[in-house]
Image (cartoon, coloured by chain):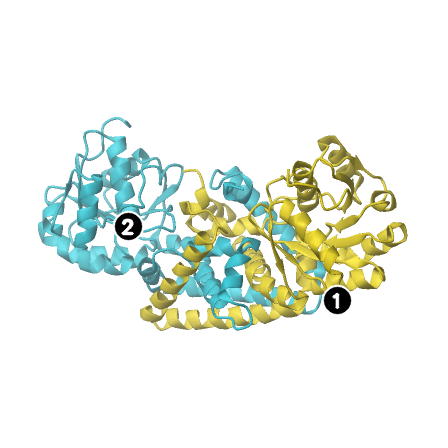
Chain colours: A yellow, B cyan
Amino acid sequence: MSGAPPFSRIAIIGLGLIGSSIARAAGQAWEGLTVTGHDASAPVRARAAELGFCAHVADTVEEAVRDAELVILAVPVGATADVACAVAPALAKDAIVSDVGSSKAGPAAALAEALPGHVIVPAHPVAGTERSGPDAGFASLFRGRWCILTPEAGTDAAAIEKVAAFWAGLGANIEIMDARHHDLVLAVTSHLPHLIAYTIVGTASDLEEVTESEVIKYSAGGFRDFTRIAASDPVMWRDVFLSNREAVLEMLQRFSEDLSQLQRAIRWGDGDALQALFTRTRAVRQSIVDSGQDDAAPDFGRRH
Amino acid sequence: MSGAPPFSRIAIIGLGLIGSSIARAAGQAWEGLTVTGHDASAPVRARAAELGFCAHVADTVEEAVRDAELVILAVPVGATADVACAVAPALAKDAIVSDVGSSKAGPAAALAEALPGHVIVPAHPVAGTERSGPDAGFASLFRGRWCILTPEAGTDAAAIEKVAAFWAGLGANIEIMDARHHDLVLAVTSHLPHLIAYTIVGTASDLEEVTESEVIKYSAGGFRDFTRIAASDPVMWRDVFLSNREAVLEMLQRFSEDLSQLQRAIRWGDGDALQALFTRTRAVRQSIVDSGQDDAAPDFGRRH
């Protein structure tokens, strides 16, 4: 229990990993909060009703959002505009609308266009796993992770405060940031890593001289680490790359330049350059562990 | 206990993560096996003696290998030739020599040149963590992992059998492979992933628009996964890239081509191409989990 809830009724549209985790975490945080859920997929709605993490799973978007004080869209960012349009006619006049998209400038523009006159407080909880769907969610997903809010300048301060209090109640640390800056930061800390992981897993699968069975057998040499994030939801990630195109391409360009430099060092046998980089990167890991953003246990704490 | 040990006296040269793990695992596997250790670094020798995972820590290579039936070099691959030359005069006539290098063709050639007349059975246990040094080792490191032996054609079959039995006793699965093929397979399952991880961690540290503190705070979006292997031993990895140069450059070339293709798909907004790749890569993760080469728990089983 985190005291009085900042909202008494919320609606979550999209009941996958993130939406269902919000519902579970909110249910644990506040007894006095009623969560109504909806998902476009009938089987997901049925499963969510079985799992029981929402007070009610509504059959339509309109029914779900009626009377909600906070409406959270937890859908792939490419679906933001359509879902916002569907939500619009049924929204309470003073409802706050938020989302959880991994890119922010694009979805925020879509929300503003579809919902003129509503207070919009976009959010991005920087948390997740490689699993998808309502069974994959869990209440502690956001604990100790950062949730970035990207309201436009001039957004009602009380509304921002309430959305921040909501996420803090789920265990998240709150940061407020400009949407464009968010998209640049996340391009490097999240989008580029996913893009690279997807690529290398594809490259390894397509080799002729090395069989897929060999790739799998000897994956403990490092490759398996990349397969985890390359197992993330395909539609969600397709939308992220299309929606944050410019920042992703910018970061990709820098990465490619750095990779070329390393390639040249290997070709020319420049061991000093390699060792200097490899020594520098070791310190970054330590900082991440020290800041509580990863497990201090070796090998991510995998069982041996 | 795994029955009678295949050797009664072994020597391990190099008492870091791998060497000290072999000593610990062998000590657990067979009571009747005596392990003598040596490390070029005096502080490492002192610490190893304190930790007590060897029956004896010798002050010199010569002393360590005297009377050993199996000598394992667990040193960075770039040091193989020098250490083999130091070992040569003190080796028992029928001693078998092995190593644990992550590349095989180069070190095997160095061993053959330095040790004419000796039986050489190169080995590569595909296991490790991002930690280094004698404190980082543990007995179960090789359990359920693959150990690849790459003896040259014509190597004494009984010697290969004994080295295989040794690794099997430490819990490893054994594969025998041509050294060149090994180097190609590991270039994709281990060396390329490390190279890419080192690169992206370097890229992220060098940005002007995004601070290092932001990179660390929001690393749970995916980036932190890469920092683990980018925290691996700098000297060991410098040597791997220099020693397996051709295969690494070949795999890097393919990766770069695939990355360019993905870059183009993003630039042109080709969502279908992105989704098709992302769907395909998801299956590879499942195969790795199914084969027991990674944890089935989401997020590597990290604590939430």
Q: Is residue B256 above or below residue A52?
A: below
Determine the chain carrying the residue at label 1.
A
Q: Residue B117 in the image: state x and y as whole percent.
A: 15, 51
Image-quadrant location for residue B298: top right
Give the side of residue A33 with respect to residue B179, left or right.
right
Query: Can see residue A45?
Result: yes
In this image, B159 relative to A42: left or right? left
Q: Quadrant of residue A271?
A: bottom left
Give the image location of residue A122, x and y in percent: 71, 58
Within-10-Å neighbours for mark 1: few <14, some 14–19, many 20+:
few
Percent from the top left, x then y, of residue A199? Answer: 56, 59
> Looking at the picture, how far across and down is residue A75, in whole percent?
73, 51
- Counting labels gives 2
Q: Are marks 2 and 1 on the same chain?
A: no
The residue closer to the viewer here, B283 or B238, is B238
Residue B243's place in the image compared with A235, above or below, is below
Left or right: B225, with B54 as reference point: right
Report the Cα–Cα distance between label 2 and label 1.
55 Å
Amino acid type for the residue under numbered disc 1: Gly
Residue located beneath label 2 in the image: B133
Which residue is the site of mark 1? A154
Quadrant containing the C terminus of chain B in the rendered view: top right
Which label sits in the foreground, 2 or 1? 1
Q: Secondary structure at mark 2?
A: loop
Q: Please name the residue shown 65% across and 49% down the image.
A: A167
Q: Chain of mark 2?
A: B
At mark 1, the secondary structure is loop
| CB within 8 Å, label 2 to label 1 | no
The kind of residue on which mark 2 rests is: Gly
